[in-house]
Image: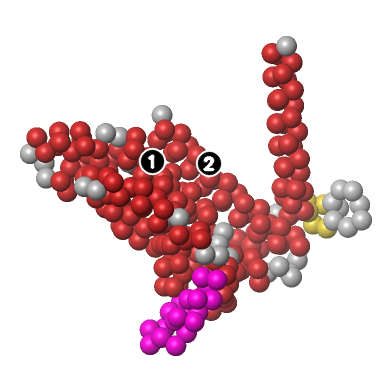
């Protein structure tokens, strides 16, 4: 009976996975087809669409801009969040519940509402932020904040912070030195998992980029949006390239997450 149930569960899971893979496989086949009209199969196969994409300077520039914004936002997140979580867990552990509530505030306001509010706030500002990458870095920081905080806080929960710090102090280490040489290495896997997960999420963000920057600083998502009316084969190659990149990042995040929980 148990073998029958196991076989049934596997059949259901494999069937669902197969159904989910069909659109991805169809998009990939379309991206390598030379022409696909009314026939069941393409007339021929070619990688010219991928070659055109990877040699397109506009695509490379948009991809580079997205990398710059995501890396800058995550760097800012690490610099600000890591010391904050350490202070909360080590000096003010009772504030942990309060931080868990505050950290969810970015999800309480829809991105469209936030974007309109930022436009009204900075449109007439003496500091030109609208249409620049700096406003995206700030908004992406708020988006990544919940993911970063929860992942790093879970890593702090997994280690015995108080005992590690007390042992370091007994051996003559200062608080800052103990944090850098003892606590931080124990958080490495959880931190890397949160970085990869947040990066894959930020790379696909469209609402803030479209409203706050648009074509004045074309990111990868804006490039994908602007190229939607070109050749379907070219767009499919772009979607598959983006999907493969996100898949690798998600796989790395899950691998680091498993290592952090083991």
The residue at which mark 1 appears reads as 154
Residue 110: % across, % down: 55, 65
User: Which region is colored magenta?
Assistant: 113-132
The residue at which mark 2 appears reads as 251
Q: Which residue is drawn at 53% across and 55% down?
A: 201
Please identify the quadrant where the C terminus is shown. Answer: top left
How many callouts does the rendering have? 2
Q: Which residue is drawn at 54% across and 76% down?
A: 116
Q: In this view, does 142 lie to the left or right of 203?
A: left
Residue 180: % across, % down: 22, 46
Q: Is residue 219 left or right of residue 235?
A: left
Q: Is residue 117 magenta?
A: yes
User: Which circle's residue, 1 or 2, is located before the other in the chain?
Assistant: 1
Q: What element carries label 2?
A: helix
Where, by quadrant of the figure, is residue 20 drawn? Answer: top right
Where, by quadrant of the figure, is residue 137 drawn? Answer: bottom left
Q: Is residue 129 left or right of residue 228?
A: left
């Amino acid at each position: 009976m148990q073998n029958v149930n196991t076989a049934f569960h596997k059949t259901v899971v494999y069937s669902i996975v197969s159904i989910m893979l069909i659109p991805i496989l169809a998009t990939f086949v379309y991206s390598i087809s030379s022409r696909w009209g009314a026939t069941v199969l393409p007339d021929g196969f070619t990688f010219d669409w991928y070659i055109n994409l990877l040699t397109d300077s506009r695509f490379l520039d948009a991809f580079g801009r997205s990398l710059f914004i995501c890396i800058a936002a995550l760097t800012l997140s690490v610099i600000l969040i890591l010391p904050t979580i350490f202070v909360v867990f080590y000096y003010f552990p009772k504030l942990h519940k309060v931080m868990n509530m505050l950290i969810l505030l970015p999800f309480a306001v829809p991105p469209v509402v936030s974007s309109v509010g930022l436009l009204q706030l900075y449109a007439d500002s003496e500091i030109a932020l609208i249409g620049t990458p700096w406003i995206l870095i700030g908004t992406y920081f708020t988006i990544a904040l919940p993911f970063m905080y929860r992942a790093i806080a879970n890593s702090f929960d997994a280690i015995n912070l108080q005992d590690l710090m007390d042992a370091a102090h007994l051996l003559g280490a200062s608080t800052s030195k103990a944090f850098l040489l003892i606590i931080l290495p124990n958080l490495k896997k959880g931190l890397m998992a949160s970085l990869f997960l947040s990066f894959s999420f930020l790379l696909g963000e469209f609402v803030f980029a479209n409203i706050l920057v648009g074509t004045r600083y074309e990111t990868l998502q804006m490039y994908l949006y602007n190229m939607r009316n070109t050749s379907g084969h070219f767009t499919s190659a772009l979607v598959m390239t983006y999907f493969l990149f996100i898949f690798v990042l998600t796989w790395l995040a899950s691998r680091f997450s498993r290592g952090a929980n083991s």
